[in-house]
Amino acid sequence: MRTFVIGCNHKTAAVDVREKLAFDDRRCAEALTAFHEAFPKAEMVILSTCNRTELYLTRPLQAPPRLHEAIEFLARQQGLDSREFASSLYFHEDSEAIRHLFRVVSSLDSMVIGESQILGQAKHALELAREQQTAGAQIEALFQHAFGVAKQVHTQTQISSGHVSVGSVALDFSRQIFSRFDDKVVLMIGAGKMGELTLRHLRDHRPRRVLVTNRTAARAQEVAQRLGVEARPYELLGDLLVEADVVLTCTGAAEPILTARGCADLPRRRKYRPLLMIDMAVPRDIEESVGELQGLFVYNIDDLQRITERHWEERRSKIGEGERIVQERVAEFVLERGRRDVGPVVTELREHFHAIAEGELQWLAPKLKDASPRERELIEQMVRRLVNKILHEPVQTLNEKGVEGRGQIYAETARRLFGLNADERE
């Protein structure tokens, strides 16, 4: 099978591009179903987070989708012209695609190096693909191996020690803005996994009060009770914005929940006290023009990247060790899969050529009536040695390409060149 990844992340695409390509669970399921119908022989997982949207694909050698077909599929699913985002995409294939996935799941490619949320997001993405029947044996094996790599990287390097998440970076950023934090009221809008993780980090900063609100009131109440903060009704969001000094947002809304029009009266109601608003969501929760209102200071997830440099410096030595582990595990996976790709065709080649040799020896046998048993044995040995010598270079090349992750291409070529009659090809 061929393996590909097509996607964009916080390094290649600004937040306005990423939010156009982002999938929530419903739209992800719809896209996976459409993919299965369009490309029944291929497998796919869609990994969509606030910092990346990636399509991981495996397909038989001669089967679709090709690169351009996958890009157009993504464009159709998002209702876009591919020219709007193609320049922000990256593309990796085979061993490089495997390496990319291992780095992503191990959080070596994250905006915040060492964050652990990406592993859960990748597992959730795989589960969605299973439900929509786009995760077969190939994708399953690839992702399970990636999860093992992530566990090894985090265990051996301790790269996730301390507070490392987008939420913790947002809070560090807040602390840099204000000279003191113990007199501040912090409002968290959104009580999902990232929101809850951010609230956990927030306790260490000891603000005066912490409020949480969510469209689903029961979820806000549950998180508030668990973390010892105050749950407030979402219907009172306007009043909560007046009360807060810092607003953190991370909802799953498809459109901004805070717009310039909706917030137009907020500065006056706040008596023009400054309000720091940090939007951690993709798609964004806060309309960019809100930041043009007097006293409202809006930052999005791309603005947080400045803070991550310090985290990166602290983890530089751990990153190197993590990269070494990833490289070793890529080689291990590629070698294992390469053997599966080329092993059968090597066997088929040997059987095919030795069968031809045996047929020729049988044709020759009646013509060797006057030959001695020793002479017959030498002729048979010569024929078999000749076959082995002819096969030596092709077999060696197949094995080498298997190690490089290109075994299936050469295996299929060998089958076509020599007319091997194997079972149904992948």
Image: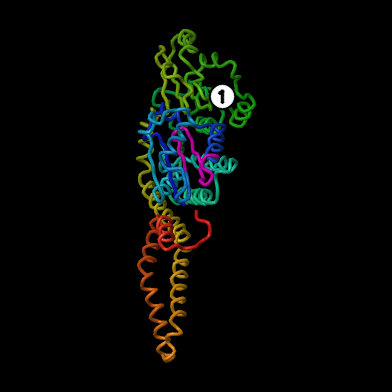
Q: Name the residue located 43 percent from the left edge and 81 percent from the top edge.
A: 364
Above or below, 24 against 403 in this view is above
Residue 13 percent coordinates (x, y): 38, 32
Front-most of 32 and 193? Answer: 32
Q: Amino acid at mark 1?
A: Val
* Residue in the image at 39% along x and 73% along y: 388
Residue at left offset 44%, top offset 28%: 80
Residue 42 inside the magenta-drawn segment: yes
Count of numbered tags: 1
The one nearer the camera, 256 or 415, is 415
The span shown in magenta is 37-56
Q: Residues within 10 Å of mark 1 (few under 14, many from 20)?
A: many
Q: Position of residue 60 (x, y in %)?
A: 48, 50
34 sits left or right of 16 in the view: right
Compared to residue 406, the image places residue 250 above or below, namely: above
When the figure is inspected, residue 166 is found, relative to residue 58, above or below; the finding is: above
Q: Residue at x 56, y 31 (%)?
A: 192
Which residue is outermost to the front?
367
Task: Tell me: 30 left or right of 341.
Answer: right
What residue sits right under mark 1 in the picture? 212
Among the 4 quarters of the image, the one containing residue 210: top right
Q: Secondary structure at mark 1?
A: strand
Residue in front for this viewpoint, 190 or 340: 340
Near-viewer residue (188 or 148) = 148
Residue 323 in picture, x, y percent from top left: 38, 49
Q: Give the colouring mode of the picture.
A: rainbow
Confirm whether the magenta stretch covers residue 51: yes
| Image: 222 above or below 103 | above
Q: Position of residue 56 (x, y in %)?
A: 47, 43
